[in-house]
Image: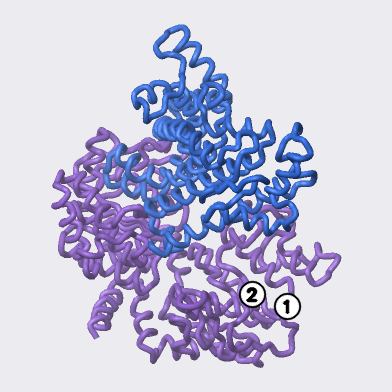
Amino acid sequence: MSLVEVDGLTVEFGDLRAVDTLSFRLEEGAALGVVGESGSGKSTVASALLGLHRGTGARVTGSVRVAGTDVQEADDDALRRLRGGTAAMVFQDPLSSLDPYYAVGDQIAEVYRVHSGASRRAARARAVDVLDRVGIPDAARRARSRPHEFSGGMRQRALIAMALACEPALLVADEPTTALDVTVQAQILDLLHSLRQETGMGLLLVTHDVGVAAESVDDVLVMRHGRAVERGTVADVLGAPSAAYTKELLGAVPRVDAARPVRADAAGDVLLEATDLRREFGRGKRAFAAVDGVSLTVRSGETLGIVGESGSGKTTLGRMLVGLLEPTGGQVLLSGTRADAGVQIVFQDPVSSLNPRRSVGESVADPLRARGDKEVRGRVEELLERVGLDPAHYGRYPHEFSGGQRQRVGIARALAAEPRIIVCDEPVSALDVTTQAQVTGLLRELQDELGLALVFIAHDLAVVRQVSDRVAVMRKGRVVEYGTVDEVYGAPQDPYTRQLLAAVPALDPGVAARRRSARRELAAA
Amino acid sequence: MTGFLLRRALGAAVTLLAISVIIYVVFYAAPGNVAQISCGPRCSPAQVQQVADQLRLDDPLYLRYWHFLQGIFVGQDFSTGTALQHCDAPCLGFSYQTDQQVTQLILTKLPATASLALGAMVLWLILGVGTGVLSAWRRGRPTERILTGITLAGTATPVFVIGLVLMIVVCGQLQWLPFPQYVPFSDDPEQWAWNLLLPWLSLALIEAAKYARLTRASMLETLAEDHVRTFRAYGVGERSIIGRHALRGAVAPVIALNANDFGSMFGGAVLSETLFGIPGLGRELVHAVNVVDLPVVVGMVLVTGFFVVLANAVADVLYAVADRRVVLS
């Protein structure tokens, strides 16, 4: 008997068939990665393993057996015993997945008591135990902290501790590292890896990130539109994919170790010069410098990548370059262009950065009207066409477009004012990899055609390597490393850059294992 | 936490001071002869002059307000023309109808109103929050539909209708209770409770409808949150999910609304007080307005404001105890 047996599973939400006659097995102690883009049905599968669709209005057919329990047929009590006791789940967003009102240790203890019937005292002790085991320092004291007193990585560790509390046979992890920084992600993946070795529990890892799967599992199941596209060992599927979709998916994944072809005309005149930029937030004791003395230049026709983890100050820096934020110290000098139209910005979230109540054409027309143009429609249609949208969609509203299309609208809006520099703040981080590749491709086309300079801000080291000519690595408001892509990625000088690069998940399982041991050495050093 | 408490107390004090300024200006700086208004239409010119002297109407407004404040904090001496009358702090002046100290008057009426407000609040919270939780739990089932219907009817019914119907049925036809007649708690606690039962119930039934709707909406919101999903996925029972995890997050708006409702019962429960013959602040206020007894009106309005502000401050502290993140922001 396998640990997980899924046969002909179909899950429908109204008219939408999220999972379509899916079948797979997971042996005891094995690790399976379910990989797919958004809408592929991968998370729906994870929920189905714990019977979480029961009572939600979703229509589930087919059979799901976990450790011998038929999830479809089990009564409510049996299902409750399965949840947490036999199979435990770790969710994507570690902040919202814990109850803000109770101490972390108490929440774990509560779950443990439900399944073991232990006394309060024993359950508390168990909570401290598992918190210690997932690497929370000073676990006995931190068990009394509330979730908001934990960092993102610690919260995810706490959730994993909750999962471990009842020693389940199966751990279901739904995008467990998607909300985390890359170095923290590496720590969590390493933790999952070592826990699996220690406890021998099975792992079903749901992720959109092929690299994360390659790091953590033995087998991969690639999903698309609710169906299994391909299944095999990590080495087979990622090394020699047989399905066309898998090939396409893998082709779109940005590689941190693949250099961008050197471009001859990359270094033009200096367009923008930032000197000793500083920006402080807060007053008095709470004041802190989000950006603390950054100097850099942007040349025409080049792409400057700015990479850093959350809180590094990269977005604050980007906003100062555009003039959306006044620097506390230092200055931004633009040469030869009107300052207001010279630099434009493309935001991360194309959903919230477009007004939902205005048509996309109107949004693109705003910068034109702002500079006094009267006849804008023709120009807007031209711009929409230029970014690969149908000009006839002028009157459509943002919700009628996909994420990638909305980001194209954002780019058209930035182009409207004919800037010489566009600052892109995480322009592709909300997009699937295949869409990501299309958007970065568009940016490069525009750059070649219009001689634009791009400042590309992102947390994803691989994407930055793919698009940039030069790179600045930021940490705690400062640039710790600044140079050409090949210098920074090929021969990083700063220990932080090395740590970042070592944390990037590798697609090759062999490389992943080497990186893992490299991380251990870095941590020990 | 200490810093938070201090900030909150300071905020309450500033609010009260602002309220006192507004009330004072509204009543005493209004156009017309304040002395005539204060004294009433039947006063002789000599009496009006006496009131004008007493009110120190020749002083500028800010000085008069200053004396008013002084009265509250350290007491004040009033000249009645022939004699000096001392009024101990907190002094809100003298009624022009009865010559009684306003503070005294309020103190005699306060217990009845406080009895009514406290009991009704306890009942409406139990009924309202209970109904709200139940209808969120049984969402989409017949139980919820029935409860929603009842609460809708409750919101739409005025207090004097429910109160009258209750009195006619319970006291008149069934004769389970005597017609309510206020008995002070200090006289006979048992009689106090029996006689207040109907007023409590009629007020609570109406208020509970509001709380049921709020609690239901708030519960549905928290039930959809990620952390609730976590505990479901860990096999925690529905009872614990509702009671421990969803309700805790859902009570914040209930606490906030309750603070206002409870506070405004002091001076605002005229209808129930009149209907059930409870000698409380609301009835006294209406009476004072009718006879244009300005010092009493100003004092009562100020006391009502005091209770609203106090209840809100208490609510904020309770909220901070429930969710410590509040203290941080």
Task: Indicate whether A328 appears above or below B58.
Answer: below
Percent x, y for residue B73?
52, 55
Instruction: From the viewer's perspective, tell me whether residue A177 is left or right of residue A327.
Output: left
**Which of the 4 image quadrants contains residue A255?**
bottom left
Instruction: From the viewer's perspective, tell me whether residue A285 is left or right of residue A498.
Output: right
Q: Is residue B59 visible?
A: yes
**Mark 2 vs mark 1, CA separation in Å:** 12 Å
The residue that appears at 68% across and 87% down in the rendered structure is A334
* Disc sitting over residue B77 in the figure: none
* Disc sitting over residue A341 in the figure: 1
In this view, which residue lies farthest toward the front?
Answer: B82
Task: Assign a secondary structure to mark 1.
Answer: helix
**Which of the 4 image quadrants contains residue A93?**
bottom left
The residue that appears at 46% across and 75% down in the rendered structure is A286
| Colour blue belongs to chain | B
Identity of the amino acid at label 1? Ala
The residue that appears at 35% across and 47% down in the rendered structure is A47
Identity of the amino acid at label 2? Leu
Task: Assign a secondary structure to mark 2.
Answer: loop
| N-terminal-most mark, 2 or 1 | 2
Percent x, y for residue A182?
38, 72
Q: Which residue is mark 2?
A: A324
Chain letter of the residue beneath label 1 in the structure image: A
Q: Is residue A17 visible?
A: no
Task: Please tell me which residue lies in front, B57 or B325.
Answer: B57
In this view, which residue lies farthest toward the right?
Answer: A374
The quarter of the rendered structure image containing the C terminus of chain A is: bottom left
